[in-house]
Image (tube, rainbow, N blue to C red):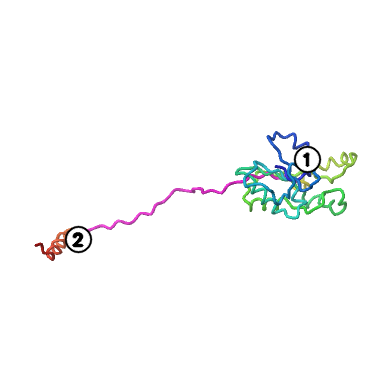
Amino acid sequence: MQLGELIDQAAIDQMDLPELIVCSSSPSSRQAQLIADPAFLPLGPESVASVIVPHVLDTHPLPHQVLREAHRVLRAEGCLVLSGFSPYSLIGLQRWLWPRAVVKGQYYSVGRVIDWLQLLGFEVVGSAMFQYAPLTKSKRLQNGLSFVNSIGDRWLPMSGGGYMITARKRELGTTMIGNLKFARQPRKLVNAASVRAIPQQAAKHSRNYHYG
């Protein structure tokens, strides 16, 4: 399942997916097979094998609920792939200086999103940063700023404007750690004097009974 359409659909179509359901909150969407709010999906628990979340956290007013719904509809060991924009980057600065060039919304850092995922029970498999240069539609500016991406990827890997995180839904279980130790009841030793006294006590009690 893909939540939102803020991604190059050609890149998704090149993936070898047996079936893809695109969910969009826009009623006028032409590519979506499901019109619904990503924070309140009309699907049953553990109904999909993987969830792709491209820049939905940046634009949705309830990012925590979006992740909760993704965790709910994912099967055990299912994969979650999400992308977003980092506020600590040139794109994050561009959001304030030239808002029309970037996606409007609230940007979250990679560490913050990873904390959210771990609190929900996801295991983060990997993360990567990309797009160190500012965004622009001009081919001339893109070619002129191409060196920024090469320098940032090598020398400033955490300053990328975009990030991608891959996580897996893990089921909680019981894990046995170490060796089992069973408590043993201490044995009481009976001395010889006590053993000799047992027949005498039995004979004494037997004289109290009369048989007719």
Residue 119 point in image, percent of width and height: 63, 53
Q: Secondary structure at mark 2?
A: helix
Q: Residue at x 71, y 38 (%)?
A: 20
Residue 113, placed above or below residue 2: below
Q: In this orientation, which residue lies closer to the viewer: 117 or 193?
A: 117
Which residue is at the far bottom?
208
| CB under 8 Å between discs 2 and 1 | no
Q: Residue at x 85, y 54 (%)?
A: 96
Question: Mark 1 is on which residue type?
Answer: Gln
Residue 156 point in image, percent of width and height: 77, 46
Q: Find the magenta span and give its range.
A: 163-192
Magenta stretch: residue 8 in it?
no
Q: In this orientation, which residue lies closer to the viewer: 161 or 51?
A: 51
Q: Is residue 57 visible?
A: yes
Identify residue for label 2: 194
Residue 132 point in image, percent of width and height: 80, 45
Q: For this view, does 153 lie left or right of residue 101?
A: left
Which residue is at the far left?
212
Residue 97 point in image, percent of width and height: 87, 53
Identify residue for label 1: 31
Report the quarter where the N terminus lies. top right
Alpha-carbon neighbours of circle 1 within 10 Å: few (<14), some, or many (≥20)?
few
Q: For this view, does 135 lie left or right of residue 157?
A: right
Q: Is residue 111 visible?
A: no
Magenta stretch, main secondary structure class? loop
